[in-house]
Amino acid sequence: MLASAALVLLMTPALAFFYGGLSRSKSVLNMMMMSFGSIGTVSVVYVLWGFSMSFGNGITGDDDIWGIFSNPFGLFGSDQLAETRDVVKGGATVTEAVTGGLTIPSTVFLAFQLTFAVITVALISGAIAERVKFSTWLVFTVLWATVVYFPLAHMVWGGGIMSGSEHGFASWLFGTVKDATGKVSAAVPPIDFAGGTVVHINAGMAGLVLVLVVGKRLGFGKTAFRPHNIPFVMLGAALLWFGWFGFNAGSELKADTNAGMVWINTTAATAAAMIGWLAVEWVRDRHPTSVGAASGVVAGLVAITPACGALTPVGSLGLGVIAGALAAVAVGLKNKFGYDDSLDVVGVHLVAGLWGTVAIGLFAKETGLLYGHDYKQLVVQLVIAAFALTFTGILTAIIAVVLKPLGWRVSTDEEAQGIDETEHAETAYEYA
């Protein structure tokens, strides 16, 4: 699990290379710094209050279905990282695991989950590349992680309203079941194995909101914003794929048969998505591109993330090829709709994340419509996708507006000169 955590942490510098290569040469350092800055701010706040908000109980010791009433400073002198603790439930004091049902120590679980929070926040940066003040971005990372990411992680993974617990919406929709130990859970629980809602729909929707609030880059629709270093893009995609095995297989939280299946599914879907993206380029543009191959890889990784523990390898191939094609088509539409999603966060993460989350209702090997011949899983998946879109969209818009007095945009002259020089007083390449 510590190796998986290290792999996921590597994904954020990998994202810096991927996004940096897609940027123009005068903006590459700022783009990479937005990812590295996220490592700094989100790691700190995750240790201070993020883990407590994501996986703790409520302040009163009772269950917290929203993740916003947890002790926000649970690590300060508390037993948040102990293996068990005494809590009050129904007037009685009971001893329970801090993060119930874990097969790993709580300290290791914190280390693993910290890296998820970091990469999710960093993903958003690609949507607003080349025009945002670095200082405002850093403040945004803290606020967004606290107000949006931690509560949503609690709702999906921490026993909240979007989980399969007896308190979740799925229990209200289709009833509950009780296992041999007496634990009550939803009869048809939502499936988000490694972050379709918490990571990709969340980051993609936040990126879309920021694009609309912050506005377009100078020359959008008139200037060709070409990637300045495609080898960087390929390197970043390769390292993301490598790190993603920690992301997906690590989310099993133990080394077993299903972890192996997750690894296979991740590879199958990602390879198929690359082919799906290139097929669209072949038909639409008559040229399969390196950037398309790299973007197809990321789209496949995004789509299989929520589904990797619930599909067969063949189902993963089907999910992946559709994900690659959908994302390629979506990226091609941004100019038509007139929103400046600089590095295609919306087209790749939001679209592929939505597809991967909803497609579980079709391809899940036991409960999906095509395999289990039941509609209930599809309904549950549609609800969690819609909830994540709404929750993230509203709260991100509020945060974006609140930060307007700080100033989102660099000046027009600074943007034209190059954000690397004006924000960081350095350049990636010395031309003198």
Image: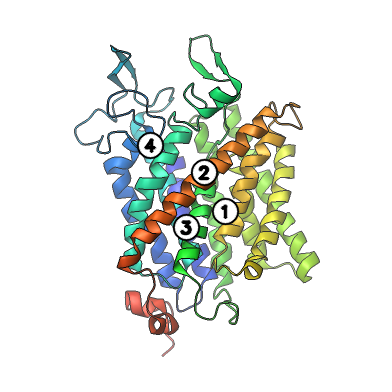
Residue type for callout 3: Ile
Task: Of the two numbered discs 3 and 4 on the same chain, state the one appearing first in sequence.
Answer: 4
Whether residues under marks 2 and 4 lie with C-beta atoms below 8 angstroms apart, the answer is no
Asked if residue 28 lies left or right of residue 352, the reply is left
| Residue occupying the far left of the picture | 77
Q: Is residue 281 above or below residue 315?
A: below
> Can you identify the residue that label 1 sits on?
349
- Res. 355 visible in picture: yes
Give the secondary structure at mark 3.
helix
Rate crowding at label 2 as few (under 14), some (14 to 19) or many (20 or more) other CA atoms within 10 Å: many
Q: Nearer the viewer, mark 1 or mark 2?
A: 2
Give coordinates of residue 320: x percent, y percent: 69, 47
Which one is in front, 64 or 311? Answer: 64
Residue type for callout 2: Ala
Which one is in front, 327 or 388? Answer: 388
Which quadrant does the C terminus fall into? bottom left
Give coordinates of residue 300: x percent, y percent: 64, 50
Which circle marks residue 54 in the picture?
A: 4
Which one is in front, 306 or 136? Answer: 136
Residue type for callout 1: His
Which circle marks residue 124 in the picture?
A: 3
Residue visible at 39% across and 65% down in the picture: 33
Give the secondary structure at mark 2.
helix
Q: CA distance from mark 3 to mark 4?
A: 20 Å
Task: Of the two numbered discs 3 and 2 on the same chain, state the one appearing first in sequence.
Answer: 3
Task: Of the two numbered discs 1 and 2 on the same chain, state the one appearing first in sequence.
Answer: 1
Give coordinates of residue 269: x percent, y percent: 68, 46
Q: CA distance from mark 3 to mark 2?
A: 15 Å
Identify the image quadrant of residue 419.
Answer: bottom left
Asked if residue 415 lies left or right of residue 375, the reply is left
Residue type for callout 4: Ser
Q: CA distance from mark 4 to mark 1?
A: 22 Å
